[in-house]
């Protein structure tokens, strides 16, 4: 069985955990299946960019584990949008920009890929990214996405809206983790 879980942990400036929650999610969007299809057929498929225009995905150049910073990086991103996810979603609703101005959060470089980890029932792949609130005010995270890229083109594979927004106080960090569990 393939299962996707999302974990959010809020860390105080002193390094202690203030909040931690892990939940099952069912948030794959159609493009994740198309990405898988391209790899299986080893042929290009037409997909929608985060800009809304169509592009041809070449499976040989697609990657999710870039080490890129900036407002439109691949990997895990967070936002304030709260619209219920739909299989045809292709872009984060309201992205929290990278930075330390009002409403922004500083991002770590890229995404941390922990590799394939053994479990008692199979294995898991862990993706992780840290965001720090240096804006001077609280920021509420309502949505989390995974973007991947092929060349310079960004595409979304996962979008989750949290049941309850997570408030990140000034100077706190939030660690977002996606676990993809494969039971065998």
Image (spheres, rainbow, N blue to C red):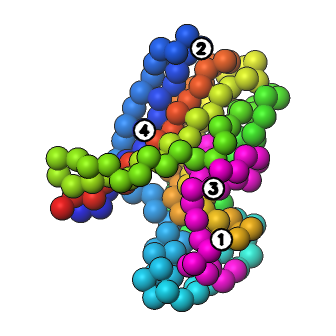
Q: Residue at the top extreme? A: 14
Q: Is residue 139 left or right of residue 32?
A: right
Residue 34 drawn above or below residue 74 = below
Q: Name the residue located 51 percent from the left edge and 38 percent from the top edge.
A: 176
Q: Nearer the viewer, mark 4 or mark 3?
A: 3
Query: Range of the magenta residues?
Result: 55-79
Question: SS of the residue at dot 2?
Answer: loop
Q: Nearer the viewer, mark 4 or mark 1?
A: 1
Tag of residue 183: none
Quadrant location of the C terminus in the rendered image: bottom left
Tag of residue 13: 2
Give the mark, 4 or 2, whose residue is nearer the N terminus.
4
- Residue labelled with disc 3: 66
Q: Is residue 137 left or right of residue 12?
A: right
Q: 6 or 122, which lies in front?
A: 122
| Labels 4 and 2 touching (C-beta < 8 A) | no
Mark 4 → mark 3, Cα distance in angstroms:
21 Å
Q: Is residue 73 magenta?
A: yes
Q: Residues within 10 Å of mark 1 (few under 14, many from 20)?
A: some
Quadrant location of the N terminus in the rendered image: bottom left
Q: Name the residue located 57 percent from the left edge and 60 percent from the top edge.
A: 64
Mark 3 → mark 1, Cα distance in angstroms:
10 Å
Question: SS of the residue at dot 3?
Answer: loop
Q: Nearer the viewer, mark 2 or mark 3?
A: 3
């Amino acid at each position: 069985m393939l299962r996707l879980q999302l974990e959010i942990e809020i860390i105080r400036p002193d390094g202690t955990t203030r909040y931690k929650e892990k939940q099952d999610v069912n948030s794959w969007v159609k493009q994740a299946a198309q990405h898988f299809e391209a790899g299986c057929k080893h042929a290009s498929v037409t997909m929608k960019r985060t800009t809304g225009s169509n592009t041809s995905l070449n499976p040989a150049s697609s990657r999710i584990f870039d080490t890129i910073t900036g407002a439109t990086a691949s990997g895990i991103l967070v936002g304030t949008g709260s619209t219920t996810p739909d299989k045809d979603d292709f872009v984060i609703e309201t992205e929290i920009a990278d930075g330390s101005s009002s409403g922004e959060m500083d991002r770590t470089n890229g995404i941390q890929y922990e590799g394939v980890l053994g479990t008692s029932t199979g294995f898991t792949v862990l993706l992780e990214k840290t965001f720090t609130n240096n804006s001077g005010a609280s920021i509420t995270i309502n949505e989390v996405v995974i973007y991947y890229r092929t060349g310079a083109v960004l595409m979304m594979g996962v979008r989750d809206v949290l049941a309850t927004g997570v408030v990140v106080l000034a100077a706190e960090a939030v660690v977002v983790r996606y676990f993809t569990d494969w039971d065998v």
